């Protein structure tokens, strides 16, 4: 047993931090300054789901599957986001080539094909096998997912539009294996097309992709309308029928949720499995490893989520030999 070290797994926060497509820009101001008052006191106004943050059940649903009102942040156990963890490597390079451009990594990192792949149980099972863990061992653990997306963290289509992500089948897999929390290195626990960036929710932005077409049309052109239907309630019913939709998304609909709108979020959170989004920092150093994961949101009464600092405690000798993370967004070259 070697020396225990802490590895930062959070993105740095600032007024220029990349944020979700319709979130407000953080405003940071001074209440006092050193020159005038002899102390520095700052104040921040921003959405609490900015940067690395935690989600509580109330963020996405009114009622959990056991019938209780969906819980707020202060109602979750103090250790809901903390515990024994493993980081699964979901950086698969043969799922297709959907992105219009593919930024190059630095030479010391693998080049990873950018795809908006829907991560399913087969990918999670494969990642577990490569990490040397039986999915049955995941009960009560924190599962961190490294899709490689954290290295694209920026105000960009690459980060927000073209992220691999999870859906209802992955959510059911997490529930089946009774994991405690899922922490993911991308814009949301769900695939971008399962969010309001696609054709879901009241906003239903259906954002324009890098090709000039809506991201829904880009996906159809690449993978076909049957594959796309997974992300669109009305297309799924049109193509596969109401009975097929009810079989797949019926549990979500039974508690008043729009089935294809952030189904992994809701399937997990509705069963008490909390989530962390925009995991970052030196995640590559602990990928494929087991460690102790620490993450504590504010004890926010009636909160729907909270920005948080995440860290891994791991044996120094067990770290992956990769360079320290250097951030370049916001003009910091």
Image (cartoon, rainbow, N blue to C red):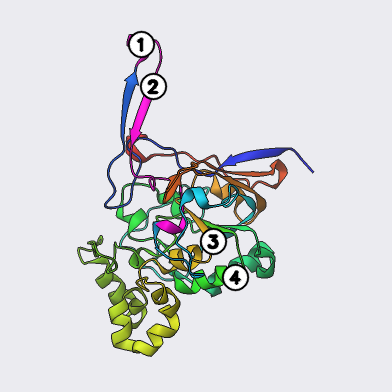
Q: Which residue is mark 1?
A: 37
Report the span colored magenta: 33-58
Q: Nearer the viewer, mark 3 or mark 4?
A: 3
Element class at badge 3: loop
In terms of sequence position, does the residue under pointer 3 or pointer 1 come before the other?
1
* x 48%, y 41%: residue: 298
Disc 4 from disc 2: Cα separation = 49 Å
Q: Which residue is mark 2?
A: 41
Quadrant of the rendering where the C terminus is positioned: top left
Quadrant that contains the N terminus: top right
Q: Nearer the viewer, mark 4 or mark 2?
A: 2
Identify the residue under disc 4.
126
Q: According to the image, label 3 marks what residue?
A: 273
Please tell me which residue is depicted at 48% across the width and 65% down the height of the picture.
68
Q: Is residue 184 left or right of residue 292?
A: left
SS at mark 2? Answer: strand
Q: Is residue 301 left or right of residue 227?
A: right
What is the number of callouts on the image? 4
Q: CA distance from mark 3 to mark 2?
A: 36 Å
């Amino acid at each position: 047993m070697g020396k225990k070290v802490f590895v930062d797994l959070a993105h740095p926060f600032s007024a220029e931090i990349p944020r979700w497509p319709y979130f407000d820009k953080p405003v940071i101001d001074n209440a006092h300054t050193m020159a005038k008052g002899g102390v520095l006191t700052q104040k921040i106004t921003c959405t609490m789901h900015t940067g690395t943050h935690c989600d509580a059940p109330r963020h996405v649903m009114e009622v959990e599957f056991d019938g209780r009102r969906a819980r707020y942040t202060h109602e979750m156990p103090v250790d809901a986001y903390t515990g024994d963890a493993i980081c699964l490597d979901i950086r698969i390079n043969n799922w297709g080539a959907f992105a219009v451009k593919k930024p190059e990594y630095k030479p010391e990192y693998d080049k990873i094909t950018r795809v908006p792949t829907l991560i399913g149980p087969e990918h999670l099972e494969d990642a577990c096998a490569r990490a040397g863990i039986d999915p049955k061992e995941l009960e009560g653990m924190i599962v961190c997912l490294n899709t490689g997306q954290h290295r694209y963290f920026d105000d960009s289509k690459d980060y927000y539009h073209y992220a691999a992500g999870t859906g209802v089948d992955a959510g059911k897999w997490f529930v089946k294996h009774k994991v405690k929390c899922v922490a993911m290195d991308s814009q949301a626990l769900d695939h971008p097309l399962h969010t309001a960036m696609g054709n879901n929710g009241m906003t239903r932005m259906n954002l324009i992709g890098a090709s000039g077409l809506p991201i829904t049309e880009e996906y159809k052109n690449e993978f076909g309308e049957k594959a796309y239907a997974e992300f669109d309630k009305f297309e799924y019913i049109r193509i596969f029928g109401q009975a097929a939709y009810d079989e797949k998304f019926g549990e979500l609909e039974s508690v008043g949720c729009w089935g294809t709108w952030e189904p992994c979020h809701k399937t997990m959170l509705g069963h008490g499995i909390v989530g962390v989004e925009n995991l970052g920092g030196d995640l590559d150093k602990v990928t494929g490893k087991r460690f102790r994961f620490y993450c504590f949101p504010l004890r926010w009464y009636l909160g729907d989520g909270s920005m948080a600092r995440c860290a891994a405690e791991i044996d120094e000798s067990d770290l992956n030999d990769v360079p320290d993370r250097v951030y370049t967004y916001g003009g910091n070259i």
